[in-house]
Amino acid sequence: MSGTDSAEGSVELWNYSSRRPPRLRRKRDVFYSSSEMSGISFLPFSILLGVLGILCVGFTVYWSHHWLGGFAWDGTDHMFNWHPVLMVTGMLVLYGIAALVYRAPLSWEGPKLPWKLLHASLTLTAFILVVLGLVAVFGYHNGQGIPNMYSLHSWIGLSAVLLFSCQWLMGFSSFLLPWAPLWLRALYKPIHVFFGSAILSLVVAACISGIIEKLFFRLSKSPTPYSSLPTEAWFGNVLGMLILVFALLVLWALARPAWKRPDVSSEDNQEPLLRGTR
């Protein structure tokens, strides 16, 4: 090929690239920068995160069954055991997965509505589990004559639940209902993103403080106190570290610019999602 042909081909290629819609050009650029330049693929990361989430739930179930005596719904200690399982499953694992829905490359193309509905469904399921977890702990306290809401763990946990409830209601009313004005959607979106990470941080603090509190209460009356680090204390500490690592990975993924869904246009803020548009 001659130099002229090469130059003409370059000009033609440039013209073709410039004629493509800006949305397609930016989507392609973002996709390649995130999949080739970052050096980290979302798929193995999501598998790792899924394994950690299963371990968090599995460790909590095993602790509640093996050391705490199992499960029941009768106002006894066994009713309390539902509380950590439901909270870890809902407020930590499901909530963390829901937060990463828009980091999946598959969500970057096509209508946004299915992903919005998936995000809302996961967080709604998490909210239902959280409510059941609260019923379990308050039912246990009331059945045993134990005061409610006296510990730092309970204050942090209830703060996370209240913020989570407001977050879900505001997100649903702003992004899934057609009544919200355009300026409100644009204004609330970064607030929604910020509080998503803030709530997850509160959840980690509540989970770890709850583990410590439970271990102190149980092992303070044991021949092998917490300070001697018996097997149950080891297990609880490992569970706390798993929870911490899971949450840190979620927050890290949320902060990665290469994994953010590209805002290729302002259409997300211009159309209510219940009409099926982006």
Image (cartoon, grey):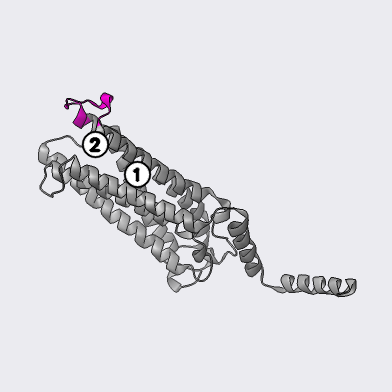
State whether residue 146 is above or below residue 182: above
Q: Residue at x 25, y 27 (%)?
A: 226
* Residue 114 position in % (x across, y down): 43, 68
* Residue 129 position in % (x across, y down): 27, 53
Q: Is residue 163 left or right of residue 31?
A: left
Q: Which residue is mark 1?
A: 160
Q: Is residue 229 magenta?
A: yes
State whether residue 193 is above or below residue 4: above
* Residue 86 position in % (x across, y down): 26, 50
For the residue carrying disc 1, how many other residues have a C-alpha within 10 Å: few (<14), some (14-19), or many (20+)? many
For the residues labelled 2 and 1, the Cα–Cα distance comes to 14 Å
* Residue 224 position in % (x across, y down): 20, 26
For the residue carrying disc 2, how many other residues have a C-alpha within 10 Å: few (<14), some (14-19), or many (20+)? some
For the residue marked with disc 2, what is the amino acid?
A: Met
For the residue marked with disc 1, what is the amino acid?
A: Ala
Q: Are marks 2 and 1 in contact (CB under 8 Å)?
A: no
Which element carries disc 2, helix, strand or loop? loop
Q: Residue at x 31, y 58 (%)?
A: 125
Residue 210 can be seen, yes or no: no
**Foreground of the two, 141 or 169:** 141
Q: Which residue is mark 2?
A: 149
**Foreground of the two, 199 or 177:** 199
Magenta part of the chain:
217-230
Which element carries disc 1, helix, strand or loop? helix
